[in-house]
Amino acid sequence: MKFPKAYTLQEIANLISVDFVGDKNFPVLGMNEIHVVEPGDIVFVDHPKYYDKALQSAATIVLINKEVDCPDGKALLISDDPFRDFNKLTKHFKPFQSSNSSISSSAKIGKGSVIQPNCFIGNNVTIGDNCVIHSNVSIYDDTVIGNNVTIHAGTVLGASAFYYKNRPEGFDQLLSGGRVIIEDHVHIGAACTIDKGVTGDTTIGEGSKLDNQIQVGHDTIIGKKCLIASQVGIAGCVIIEDEVTIWGQVGMTSGITIGAKAVISAQSGVSKSLEGGKSYFGTPADDFRSKYKEIASIKKIPEILEKLNKK
């Protein structure tokens, strides 16, 4: 998430009432999660296990809960609760805006596009040309939809990330200030849910086709010309490269990469990154042929045990 203008370190520190280490005029251009940070961004960290990763990331401002040695060319914001203060920044720069109409006056809808009854189109949404948005679709603020996109009934674009901190008093949500981007010629089935990024974008690439009842987590990037069948659940921060095929009821953990042209068979559980150009099956998902050999071997176990018992 980029700020509307450059701020100084002093201004940001004052905004969230924290101390800082570095030049008070150090430029602050935005805020992002660690996997998408760029120079000028704030990243937050609140556990010693991840200090080095945050301090050595591309981010040049680190919101941290302990004063540590500051790397050259960077600055620190010292907070007793970085998670809370990161949320403060999101609230300030991306506050919730209520709507008073089903289609916001700030939404831009292209030529030839059809919005069926009972849809909700939020603030600053952009919809391209020749799109069809079927009934009861909800498109949250700031979503960007390209040309020739079809979205079927009951789909929700832009719900909050499923991202919580466990506190003694209950779960505290990390607020989402990102977007959903749907590129040209994408088809999204009925009752799909695509969450917006926490600070970045959740993206569905050009020409990809999604079946009904699919969940796509925050900040996930799906490449071009992918095919995803019904009831697939994709966690946050997943990268799915171009021309991947995913069959029904596949589940994926967060932070992994699926290589281009991979094929994942139905009901597989994907717990690690998978190389492109191969077929996979099972839980945990593995090379298709290897997995079936494994299953065939397991089926022989009773026969082997019976022979051993007779000896």
Image (spheres, rainbow, N blue to C red):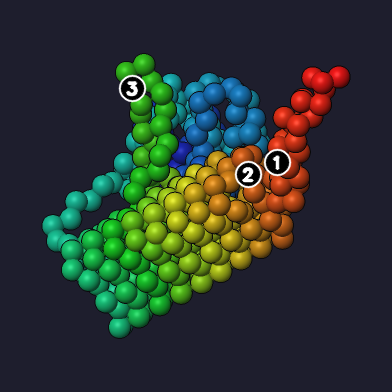
Can residue 146 be seen in the rendering of this structure?
yes
Amino acid identity at mark 2: Gly
Q: Distance between the residues labelled 3 and 1?
A: 43 Å
Seen as rendered, the residue at the extreme left is: 100
Cβ–Cβ under 8 Å for marks 1 and 2: yes
Front of the two marks 3 and 1: 1
At 61% from the left edge and 61% from the top edge, which residue is drawn?
Answer: 244
Q: Which of 196 and 47 is in front in this view?
A: 196
Alpha-carbon neighbours of circle 3 within 10 Å: few (<14), some, or many (≥20)?
Answer: few
**Residue 120: % across, % down:** 22, 61
Which residue occupies the extreme front position in the image?
A: 310
- Examine the rendering and report whether any part of residue 106 can be seen: no
Q: In this view, does 246 lie to the left or right of 202?
A: right
Q: Which amino acid does label 3 sit on?
A: Gly
- Circle 2 packing at 10 Å, graded few (<14), some (14-19), many (20+), is some
Q: Which of marks 3 and 1 is nearer the N terminus?
A: 3
* Of the image marks 1 and 2, the number of the one nearer the N terminus: 2
Q: How far apart are marks 2 and 3 (CA)?
A: 35 Å
Which residue is disc 3 drawn over? 170
Q: Work out whether residue 221 or residue 77 is closer to the camera in this orientation and state it.
A: 221
